[in-house]
Amino acid sequence: MSRIPLEVEIGARALKGLLGAPENADALVIFAHGSGSGRLSSRNTYVAEALRKSGLATLLLDLLAPEEEIRRSNVFDIPLLAKRLSLATAWAREQAETARLPIGYFGASTGAGAALVAAADDRRIFAVVSRGGRPDLAGDALERVRAPTLLIVGGQDQPVIALNREAQQRLKVESELVIVPGATHLFEEPGALDEVIAHASRWFLTRLPRPQRQSA
């Protein structure tokens, strides 16, 4: 399997993505980016690279086409973003490199809300991680999520901490709220994103099941 992320196009709208699959990957993590971000996000690219080093395949994608991003309302259209994420998930299950891999979601900002909505509708999503996310935007879907969910928030991101605490109370599954001391919403402080990676890796590697491998 490819070690270097490859450009892919997904679905009839040809959504742009970056698929990176290390040899003998244990699972696939699909990224749902937040408002004003996409597959080339420096922060999520950094996280994805670290996850691949731990043996996880990654798919970073643009949930909206460039012409759709012009309309601000689309950026906060959680049902639309969740539908696109589900489309990418179905696509991944049909690819030779990733078809056998258990899947988890990594959501950032509004993308976390979309990830939780998509996970609520799919029993085969086995773990969700939110970074500086808005899980509250998932609304009533929170109570239907079956995947163990990790919420990571910066210690200086006070309004989002409160929203995450409220959302966690609505979750009916295993969940954990991690607050990274001194970090702001984008985790731009030295070492902050590395803490995100450590917690996300732990969550995915311990909650995602091992894939079924073909015997020789």
Image (spheres, rainbow, N blue to C red):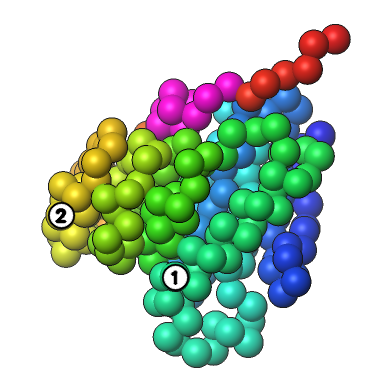
- The picture quadrant where one finds residue 20 is top right
User: Residue 34 at what x, y percent from top left?
Assistant: 44, 66
Question: What span is colored magenta in the figure?
Answer: 200-210
User: Residue 175 at what x, y percent from top left?
Assistant: 27, 37
Give the residue type that dot 2 points to: Glu
- The picture quadrant where one finds residue 38 is bottom right
The answer to whether 139 appears left or right of 32 in the picture is left
Q: Which residue is the site of mark 2?
A: 166
Q: Which residue occupies 32% across, 57% down? A: 141
Q: Is residue 69 magenta?
A: no
The answer to whether 62 appears left or right of 16 in the picture is left
What kind of secondary structure does the magenta stretch mostly adopt? helix
The answer to whether 172 appears left or right of 65 in the picture is left
Looking at this view, is 157 or 170 the one in front? 170
Mark number, residue 79: 1
Q: Mark yes or no: residue 107 visible.
A: no
- The picture quadrant where one finds residue 194 is top left
Tag 1's secondary structure?
A: helix
Tag 2's secondary structure?
A: helix
Number of callouts in the render? 2
Please say if 195 is above or below 209. Answer: below
Give the residue type that dot 1 points to: Pro
The answer to whether 143 appears left or right of 12 in the picture is left
